[in-house]
Image (cartoon, helix red, strand yellow):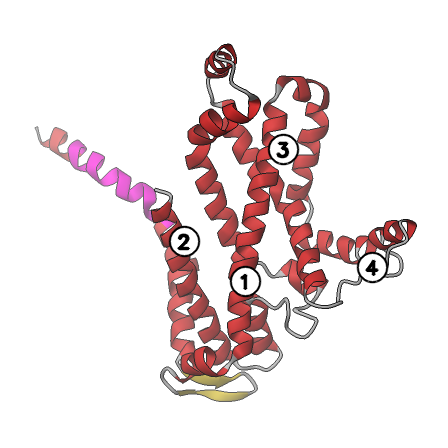
Amino acid sequence: MERSAFRSRQDRAFPYVAILPAVAVIILVGLIPAIHTFVLSLESYELIHPPAKFIGLSNYLDLLFNNPRYLHALSFTVLFALAATGLELVGGFIIAYLLADRDVSHVYSSLIRTLLMVPFVVAPIAVSYTFKTLIYDQTFGYLSYFLRLLALPPFNLFHGTVNPTVGILVMEVILRAPFIAIVVYAGLSSIDPEISYAADIDGASSLQKIVRIVLPIILPILIVAAVLRFMDALKMFDEIYVLTAGGPGYTTENVSLFAVTQAFSYFHMGYAAAAAFVFLILVIILVSYFMRAFR
């Protein structure tokens, strides 16, 4: 009897013991740095002029009411993440749907699968340098070369506000759409072929099958993939830093680049921590809103 009660207590405790390592990692990697960042954001801490001085919410008030550069970084970060996620969903779905088509995959399956794996084995910073030097370079880039063949002016990555944003967006979509494609392909592979056969018998077109059958079935998968990509796009740093460094001016500066600049160029550690913490709260609100909206 005692042994049975002991085993029952072990069974009840096992789930908590099993998740203990994950909880410990979350606390060490997520919760403790977040608390430290919040404490630092309440201080005026210059890295080259210690010690820190407590100033309360002054950093937050200055960021939100006296710093248009930070407000621009916030808006650019969110709008860019929305645009990138939307384009990646469309591109990833098209790739996955073609890969799931037997006629297409029978001929090009190996090539498509190989291309989908390339972004996962290449560092984003290497891809960024490749785009900057071999594709977007105004003098020697392939894009400018083909534009000249069409009697068009060469592409200048730093001209105006549209070119740099579009340049980063195109590279981000090419780099990240394969993730969406792989996730969506897994969802498409789980659809019972009999459903598609029944739709063919009823005379449904390809577009009707996509809208009325495929999308409703894989919608939960699309939502998860979209949220993951949206969160990843919000914290993007490498690609923007390499391609434009936030320029021209601070046109393409996002929150990550803004915080790094404040911390390690101007040495305003408390100010940078406040910028990061405001962004953290914004990300939590946005992700919670999207999860509730699509539930």
User: At label 2, which amino acid type do we have?
Assistant: Val
Where's residue 241, x and y in %?
66, 64
**Rendered location of residue 245, percent (x, y):** 68, 68
How much space separates mark 4 and mark 1, taking CA atoms?
25 Å
Q: CA distance from mark 3 to mark 1?
A: 26 Å
Which residue is pictured at 76% across the width and 62% down the height? 157
Q: Start and end of the magenta stretch?
A: 7-22
Tell me how far mark 3 sits from mark 2, CA to CA.
26 Å
Is residue 89 toward the left or the right of residue 114 in the image? left
User: To which quarter of the image does residue 65 belong?
Assistant: bottom left
Examine the residues drawn in magenta and state their main secondary structure: helix
Residue at the extreme left = 1
Q: Earlier in the sequence, mark 3 or mark 1?
A: 1
Say above or below: 181 vs 134: above
Quadrant containing the C terminus in the rendered view: top left
- Residue 137's mark? 4
Q: Quadrant of the N terminus?
A: top left
* Mark 2 residue crowding within 10 angstroms, few (<14) / some (14–19) / many (20+): some
Q: Which mark is residue 77?
A: 1
Secondary element at tag 4 = loop
Question: Which sits in the foreground, 259 or 185?
Answer: 185
Q: Earlier in the sequence, mark 4 or mark 2?
A: 4
Question: Which residue is under mark 2?
Answer: 287
Dot placed on the residue nearer the N-terminal end, 2 or 1: 1
Label 2: which secondary element: helix
Q: Secondary structure at mark 1?
A: helix
On residue 5, the disc is: none
Q: Which residue is mark 3?
A: 95
Which three-letter amino acid code belongs to the residue tagged 3?
Ile
